[in-house]
Structures are given as C-alpha cells and as structure tokens.
Image (tube, helix red, strand yellow):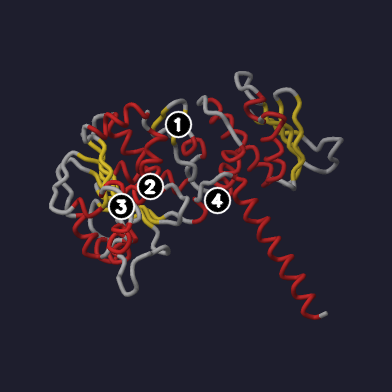
Amino acid sequence: MTEAQPASPAHPGVPTHTVVIPQDVAMVALLGPRDELLRTIERAFPKLDVHVRGNEVRLAGETGEMALAERLLDELVAVAGTGQPLNRDAVERSIGMLRASTTERPVDVLSMNIVSNRGRTIRPKTLNQKHYVDAIDEHTIIFGLGPAGTGKTYLAMAKAVAALQAKQVNRIILTRPAVEAGERLGFLPGTLNDKIDPYLRPLYDALHDMVDPDSMAKLMASGTIEVAPLAFMRGRTLNDAFIILDEAQNTSPEQMKMFLTRLGFGSKMVVTGDTTQVDLPGGTQSGLKVVQEILDEVDDIHFARLTSDDVVRHRLIGEIVNAYERHDERRSRRAAKGDHA
C-alpha cells in the first residue's frame, strides 16, 4: 500500500512517500465530505505536506511523522473496510492512540460493536474504554471509575443489553442511590415512584438509546428490566442478572457492602462512579473510596480506571469551553486595566 520515493521536485531534499488507497475504498469515505477528514489529518501533522490525487496520498516531511501518518491511513482504510463511517472524532482518536504507541490498533477499538438499535451502534471510542468493556467480559464484578463523560455507565448498560439479547442473563437491574431522599423527596408531589423518578431519569434516558420504546415498555412491565433506587436492593439475592450500580460514589460503606452481597449465581455486577464528585453529607465516607482498599486484590474483581482523556463528548463542547475561558481572560484583563486607570 505504501511506496517510497526519492525527494520530490516540489519538495527538494525532503523524503516523500505515496500511500496507494485500495480501489474498493471510496476516497470520499476516507477523506470525508468536502475533505473534512483530510483537513483534520493536515492539522494533526503540521510538519507534513499532504497531497491527494486520485487514490494516492503523497506525504512529504519528517520521516517519523510520515511513518505515523502512513499508519494512520492504514488504520482508517481498515476501519472503512468494516463498513463503519469515519468522522472527525474517529480520526482524532486514532491519531491519539497511534501517538501513544500502544500495541492495540485503532481499528480494533473503533470497530468493536457492543449493541445496535435503530441504525445506531454503541462502541468504545478510546483505548481505555475498550479495556473497560473487555474487563466486563472477563470478570464478575467490575468497578468503572472516572470523571463524568467517560462512558462508564453508558457502556456498561450497552453490555447489559447485549448480554440480555444473547440470553446470557435473564434480566437487567439498574440502580442508583437517591442521595437527597431523606431530606427532599417528601416535599415532592405524587407517589413514591414519582418522587424517585428524577434520580433514575438518566438511566431511563440511556436505555432509550439502546432499546426500542415499545420493547422497553414490555421489558419493564415484565420485570426483565428493572430501574430502582439502591434502597430497594436490600434483602434480595439477584441471580442470572446483569446489575449496574451508578453514581456509586454517593453510597456509604455500608450501602456498598449491602449491594455487593446481593450478587447471585450467573450474575454480573458493574459499579460506576467518580470519587471526585461525592455528594454525601459532611463526614460520611464514600463507599466507592473505601471499597478500593478492601477489594483491590480479590480475584475476579476488576477496577477499570478511566481518565479525562476518555471523555467522549461532541467536539464543539471543548471549543465552547475554550471560547468561554478566552472570554473570561479578556474580561479579567479589561478589569485589571480599569483598576490601574
């Protein structure tokens, strides 16, 4: 796929390589509409000149960067070959994985399908997310730790739906602690279900992405999918179930022990949370912090740790945040000048 050439007349003294794209890969799929993905590659490799002619991509510049760009094109061709559409996010994440010099290929991460619904496929988008998903397959109890937006709960729920569809489990149980239940729920109108619904709504929202609305109503009515506050888990033994505890940083050590001891035969548990976002009353320890010290070396229990690098959000969010930061800096400078005036 790659041909080495001497220096080009257009780039005297600079080595060049030509990457020949297979004929069965559409260049528009590889480079994006209006060459959007080509521009993404050019921005990521400012020390390279990238020129496309027909199904050939000619690279000129530093040898190391040129080799990395060639590997990127190989990976993007492989991803396109799986039938998965490429986008800017996939290209940028592929570049990040290649620069990190990991042994795993971006195509292995980006082409891993967990569950599909209404034309949408849920899959990991970073290497750490893939390791997290793999750990769910390999262990009985998995702790997904990391900041908001890293896909901890979303990927776990996708694995739960996939396990239910494959008949690996008979039901899915999703639970969260209602941290403010003791203080505020009594002031909300309606039944108990009406009062706890706001705490569980994020779980319902994620489910709607993975299960058809008609099917979801039937599955919930039959108890095949259950969404309930953590307090409802006490006294139960959960067999042949995929059980997810979300927002686990807001459990006490006693609640965490209670939850983990609900595990029955043929079941799998995933516990997700962010220990930097504890909302418990002052002085109450987080069960998620304590459990890492207690269970870290227990066999068949795995702690998957995601980082800010694994945050998966629309690319515009980062640009919006940066714009606000620049705006705040400008206001601060103007205020400082005003003080000195």
Q: Nearest the camera: 150 or 179?
A: 179
The numbered dot on residue 176 is 3
**Quarter the C terminus occupies:** bottom right
Residue receiving disc 2:
153
Q: Nearer the viewer, mark 1 or mark 4?
A: 1
The amino acid type found where label 3 is placed reads Arg
Q: CA distance from mark 3 to mark 2?
A: 11 Å
**Quarter the N terminus occupies:** top right
Picture coordinates of residue 17, whole percent (x, y): 72, 35
The amino acid type found where label 4 is placed reads Ala
Secondary structure of residue under mark 3: strand
Residue receiving disc 4:
100
Q: Going from the N terminus, do you reach mark 3 or mark 2 first? A: 2
**Is 24 drawn above or below residue 318 in the view shown?**
above
Q: CA distance from mark 2 to mark 4?
A: 25 Å
Q: Going from the N terminus, do you reach mark 1 or mark 4 first? A: 4
The amino acid type found where label 1 is placed reads Thr
Residue receiving disc 1:
121
Q: Nearer the viewer, mark 3 or mark 2?
A: 3
The residue at the far bottom in this view is: 340
The amino acid type found where label 2 is placed reads Thr
Density class for disc 4 (Cα within 10 Å; few <14, some 14-19, many ≥20) is few
Q: Going from the N terminus, do you reach mark 4 or mark 3 first? A: 4
Q: CA distance from mark 1 to mark 4?
A: 26 Å
Picture coordinates of residue 202, whole percent (x, y): 39, 46
Q: Residue at x 65, y 40 (%)?
A: 69
